[in-house]
Amino acid sequence: CMEFDEVHEKFGDRVSFWGTLGTQKLLPFGTKEEVKKITLSRLEKCGYVGGIVIGPTHIVEPEVPWENLIAIKDAASEYEKSLT
């Protein structure tokens, strides 16, 4: 299993990504700060090379805290504001 950074480094100039926010560890067990940090990292990395549709890798299970989903939205808004 390859980590996102490794896949992006190898193929990021030729593909765009969908999801990338883990539904088995990050979203159900990460803090809202961790979710926001990783979301921003992915947006920044793919914003320069390739592209991304940011979101969960799969269906969001009931154990995912609502705050972690809001952290994705907040990170996307913060990233968008940084572009202007």
Image (tube, rainbow, N blue to C red):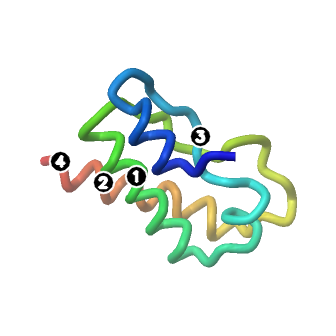
Q: Which residue is mark 2?
A: 79
Q: Residues within 10 Å of mark 4 (few under 14, many from 20)?
A: few
Q: Residue at x 74, y 65 (%)?
A: 25
Q: Which residue is mark 4?
A: 83
Q: Residue at x 28, y 48 (%)?
A: 80
Q: Residues within 10 Å of mark 3 (few under 14, many from 20)?
A: some
Q: Looking at numbered disc 1 in the image, what kind of residue is underneath it?
A: Ala
Q: Nearer the viewer, residue 33 or 45?
A: 45
Q: Looking at numbered disc 2 in the image, what kind of residue is underneath it?
A: Tyr
Q: Secondary structure at mark 1?
A: helix
- Please state if 67 lies on the left or on the right of 9 as rendered: right
Alpha-carbon span between mark 3 and mark 2: 16 Å
Q: Residue at x 74, y 54 (%)?
A: 23
Select label 3 or label 2 by which is in front.
3
Alpha-carbon span between mark 2 and mark 1: 5 Å
Above or below, 81 against 66 in this view is above
Sooner in the amino-acid sequence: mark 3 or mark 2: 3
Q: Looking at numbered disc 3 in the image, what kind of residue is underneath it?
A: Gly
Q: Looking at numbered disc 4 in the image, what kind of residue is underneath it?
A: Leu
Question: What's the mark number on residue 76?
Answer: 1
Q: Secondary structure at mark 3?
A: strand
Displayed quadrant of residue 11: top left
Sooner in the amino-acid sequence: mark 3 or mark 4: 3
Q: Which residue is mark 3?
A: 19
Q: Residue at x 68, y 54 (%)?
A: 22
Residue found at the far right of this picture: 62
Q: Nearer the viewer, residue 46 or 59?
A: 46
Select label 1 or label 3 by which is in front.
3
Q: Are marks 4 and 2 in contact (CB under 8 Å)?
A: yes
Residue found at the far top of this picture: 14
Q: Are marks 2 and 1 in contact (CB under 8 Å)?
A: yes
